[in-house]
Image (cartoon, rainbow, N blue to C red):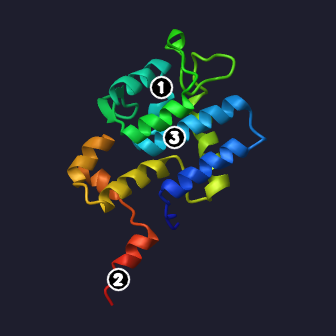
Amino acid sequence: MSKIIKESVSEVEFKKLISHVRGDLSIKENTKSNLIRTFTLLYYTGSRLNELIQLLNSDILEIFKNKELIIKTHKTKNERKIYFSDDAVKELKKIFIDIDKEESHFKIIRSKSKPYQSPHNITFIQQVNKYMKAVLGERFSSHSFRQGLITEMATKGINTKIIKEFIGHSDIKTTMRYIRPTDEDLKKCLIR
């Protein structure tokens, strides 16, 4: 069995996804909101999807205030600090415009009838991945955002040890496996 090459999400794919979700008349408003929030946070943080599902409105308010957030990673149960650029905060403010301090205990990815609950993790992850595959193709999944951010950081010359810490990997070998140069990156390295 051959392994399929997974593609990275770059700014182009991110904008395509957001545009598609906004124009998709076949999905309900709550699903639309959940997808836009998910894709935006994945793009700017490179987080794992199950890390985002646990976030509350109070976490978003913390990001607005301090441009950082400490979360407990679902995979390792360790804490990790996520940092946000000015551009990321600006984009988050656009999509979390209706956030209310009185609803700080509400999930940011929420069930329509129960805003204090997230959709079932596996169901939501499947929904996100299915949507991405429909819009971008079979080589994309929610993890493509993580791979895309790591690859972009590496191609900009950021030290791999710094990338490892930023993304929350315990082993630098894991970080190295995520780096997938684009076709354009590979073409630029041709010397003959």
* Nearest to N terminus: mark 1 or mark 2: 1
Query: What SS does tag 3 mark?
Result: helix
For the residues labelled 3 and 1, the Cα–Cα distance comes to 16 Å
Q: In the picture shown, does residue 165 fall above or below 10? A: above
Q: Which residue is mark 2?
A: 190
Question: Do we see residue 90 in this rendering?
Answer: yes
State the image quarter where residue 72 is shown: top left
For the C terminus, the quadrant is bottom left
Q: Which residue is mark 3?
A: 40
Give the residue at x 61% y 53%: 16
Q: Nearer the viewer, mark 3 or mark 1?
A: 3
Tell me which amino acid carries mark 1.
Answer: Gln
For the residues labelled 1 and 2, the Cα–Cα distance comes to 44 Å
User: Residue 121, how many percent across, how many down?
Assistant: 56, 31
State if disc 3 and disc 2 touch (CB < 8 Å).
Answer: no
**Which residue is at the front of the view, 156 or 119?**
156
Q: Is residue 57 left or right of 67 when viewed as pictured?
A: right
Q: Which residue is mark 1?
A: 54
Tell me which amino acid carries mark 3.
Answer: Thr
